[in-house]
Image (cartoon, rainbow, N blue to C red):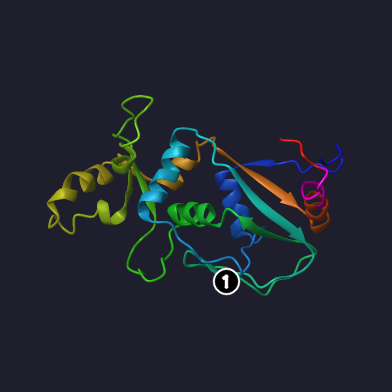
Amino acid sequence: MFTSTERIKPDAQSIPLYLENLLSHKYQIPTFQRDVVWEKENVKKLWDSIYKFYPLGSILIWKTNTKLESHREIGGIKFADNFYSNEYQYILDGQQRTTSLLTSIHGGKIANNENFDPTLYIDLTIELTDATDDTSYAKRFLFWDEIDDRDSQLKANIGKKQRYQDKLIVSLIAEMLNADTKLYIISYTKSQKLKLVSKTSSPQTNEHS
C-alpha cells in the first residue's frame, strides 16, 4: 500500500471541465492506444448512466515529462501536435468514454462513416417510467439521423423534427451546463507506478483489498 503521502488521490472533474482540459491539450491520447469508437447504442447507454447519475468510473492518466507521439485527431476533431510542455498527461484508460463524450457534445467525424454526425441530442419529452427503466434511453437520446425528416420524406422522423424545432429536443451541450456527474481522474507518475507494481507483485502479499 502507499503511505499517506504516496497515495494516488482521484481528482473529481465535471464532464465539461474534463473535455475543456482535453481540448486545451492538458490531456492527450498516445498513439499506442487503439483508435476505437463505440457503437451508437453504447454511446446512448453511456449518456443514460449520466442521466441517472450513475458513477462513470475513473480515467487513468499518466503524468510524465516525456513527449510521446499522440493522436492528432480524436473523433475527427483535430489537435495540435507541435507544442511542448514541462509535463505531459496521457490517457491510458478511458479512451472510448473520452471519445464518446467529446463527439457527443462537440461533434466530429467517425472513421469509415464520415457522413454520420456523432453529435447527440436529448428529447426532453421522454421521461423515466420508473427506477428500473432501462429502455427509454433509446428514444431519449438521439443522433441527427434519427431526427432529420429530410423535408418530410422520412415520416418516422416528422414528429421528432417538429419537437426539435419547438426546442423540446436539444443538443447535449445545452443540458451539460446543468449536469453534476463527475469523472474521477487518477493521475500517476512513473515512480508511483513502479511502487504500486512492486507492492502488488510481492509474493508475501496475500491480503485481499
In the displayed structure, 188 sits above or below 131; it is below
Counting the numbered discs, the total is 1
Instruction: Indicate the position of residue 130 as horizontal and vertical percent values.
Output: 34, 24
Nearest the eye: 152 or 199? 199
User: Residue 92 vs residue 75: left or right?
Assistant: right
User: Residue 83 vs residue 120: left or right?
Assistant: right
* Residue located at (38% from left, 56% from top): 39
User: Residue 200 vs residue 177: left or right?
Assistant: right
Q: Which residue is mark 1?
A: 72
Q: Residues within 10 Å of mark 1 (few under 14, many from 20)?
A: some
In the displayed structure, 89 sits above or below 57; it is below
* Residue located at (81% from left, 55% from top): 194
Residue range of the region highlighted in magenta in the rendering? 198-204
Whether residue 42 appears in magenta in the rendering, the answer is no
Secondary-structure class at tag 1: loop
Whether residue 199 appears in magenta in the rendering, the answer is yes
Nearest the eye: 198 or 130? 198
* Residue located at (61% from left, 57% from top): 22
Residue at the far top: name it.
130
* Residue located at (59% from left, 59% from top): 23
Q: Amino acid at mark 1?
A: Arg
From the image, which quarter does the C terminus lie in? Answer: top right
Snapshot quadrant of residue 125: top left
